[in-house]
Amino acid sequence: MAGLEHNGGSLRGALSAAPPRVWLQSLELDEAGPWAISEAERAWSAELPLPVQRRYRASRHQLRSRLAELLQLNPEAVPLHSPPGQAPSLAEGLGCVSLSHSRDQLLLAWSPWPIGVDLEWQQRRIQAELLARRFFPPQEWFELQRLAPPQRAPQVLESWVRKEAAIKWQRSSLATDLRHWQWCAEHQRLEHLLEGWQPRSVCERRNGWLCAVVGQAAEQAIWD
């Protein structure tokens, strides 16, 4: 690919030393497009219900547009494989990607290493104690009960978005692994209790949104 040459060398080599990139932006749902997506993505989206179709096309269009800047390619030519309901992936040697959307916001990320992201509205109403009792490890549930009631919902929400991002980093599913991830707010440690993984994680508060990023050098990510 001629577009993968960078300053006389390989862009792949340059990307391997780059910090992660994260973008929080509006999920533009312009029904008319134009959509900078692949033919496969057009075909996949045609099988989706209309509201889901528009979100899918918009999110892949915006992901491709961001990646095009990094890879020096046209958005449609970015070697992205991203079927509905599956974790997106790039061609070997071009890094890793993740995305999350909620309401009208989209969180995108690229990294030389595996990465996962998740976002949620900071003021979302949740049944914090019910969720924690049902889905959190016993030790995390115990620590949560030591907090004053007004502090519990924000803590549960932050823990939840970190864990969803971790599961995307892991390329697993909520059903399989949510119970095995534990967030220790006191020590700022995210841990998979079965595997012993402790990936780096950050949770940024931006414009009323909780944005979690999990993966190597997550704390060094450049936000745009």
Image: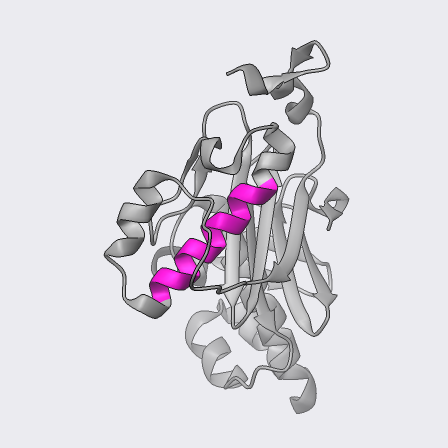
Left or right of residue 102: residue 184: right
Q: Is residue 159 above or below residue 9?
A: below
Left or right of residue 64: residue 204: right
Residue 102 in view here: yes
Q: Is residue 103 above or below residue 76?
A: below
Question: In front here: 79 or 133?
Answer: 79
Residue at 55% from the left image edge and 59% from the top image edge: 118
Left or right of residue 143: residue 98: left
The question of residue 55 being in magenta is answered with yes
In percent of width and height, residue 112 lies at 61, 31
The question of residue 71 being in magenta is answered with no
Q: How is the image coloured?
A: one colour
**Start and end of the magenta stretch?**
52-66
In percent of width and height, residue 205 lies at 72, 67
Residue 196 in view here: no
Report the number of discs: 0
Q: Find the residue positioned furthest to the top.
A: 8
In percent of width and height, residue 95 lies at 55, 31
Question: In front here: 163 or 223?
Answer: 223
Residue at 59% from the left image edge and 57% from the top image edge: 107
SS majority, magenta: helix
Q: Could you say which quadrant of the image residue 81 lies in?
A: top left
Question: In front here: 111 or 36?
Answer: 36
In percent of width and height, residue 29 lies at 48, 65
